[in-house]
Amino acid sequence: MENKEYTMKQEQLARFAKAMGHPARVAIIEFLIKQNSCFFGDIHEVLPISKATVSQHLKELKDAGLIQGEIETPKVKYCINRENWKIASMLFAGFFGQCVCEKESCCE
C-alpha cells in the first residue's frame, strides 16, 4: 500500500487557509497589518464584530500562528506573527503560482 500522507507544506498551507477562511478573520488581519506596533485595546471597538466573536476569531488566528498576543487585563495586545506571516506568504505564493493551463479554459 502506498504512503498517502500529506506533506508538511500542504498541512501548513491548509492550516493557514482555514484560519483565513472567515471574513471577520480577514478583517482582523487587515486591521493588525495596518498597525505600526502591537494593537493594545479592544478590537471589537474598531471593527463591526462583537466581543465574544472577536475572542473566538483571535484564538483561531493565534492557534494557526498568524498572530501573536498577550492578555494584559483588562486589554489584550495582538500583532502579526511576522515570521509565520512570511512563511504563509511564501506558501500561498507558491501554491497560487503553480503552472496553470495556458488556454482560457482547461476543459477545452
Image (cartoon, rainbow, N blue to C red):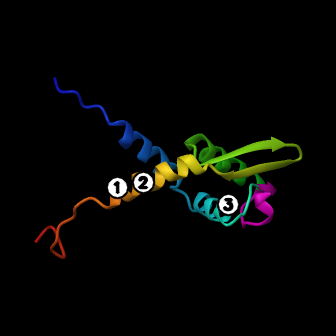
* Membership of 14 in magenta stretch: no
Which residue is label 2 attached to?
A: 90
Q: Earlier in the sequence, mark 3 or mark 1?
A: 3
Instruction: Name the spot of residue 76 as percent of width and height, x first.
Output: 80, 48
Q: Is residue 106 above or below residue 6?
A: below
Alpha-carbon span between mark 1 and mark 2:
6 Å
User: Which residue reaches farthest left?
Assistant: 108
What's the residue type where badge 2 is placed?
A: Met
The foreground one among 56 and 6 is 6
Q: Position of residue 80 (x, y in %)?
A: 64, 53
Upstream in the sequence, badge 3 or badge 2? 3
Q: Residue under circle 1?
A: 94
Describe the element under mark 2 as helix, strand or loop: helix
- Kindly check if marks 3 and 2 are in contact, taking CB atoms under 8 A apart as contact: no
Circle 1 — which element? Answer: helix
Q: Nearer the viewer, residue 97 or 83?
A: 83
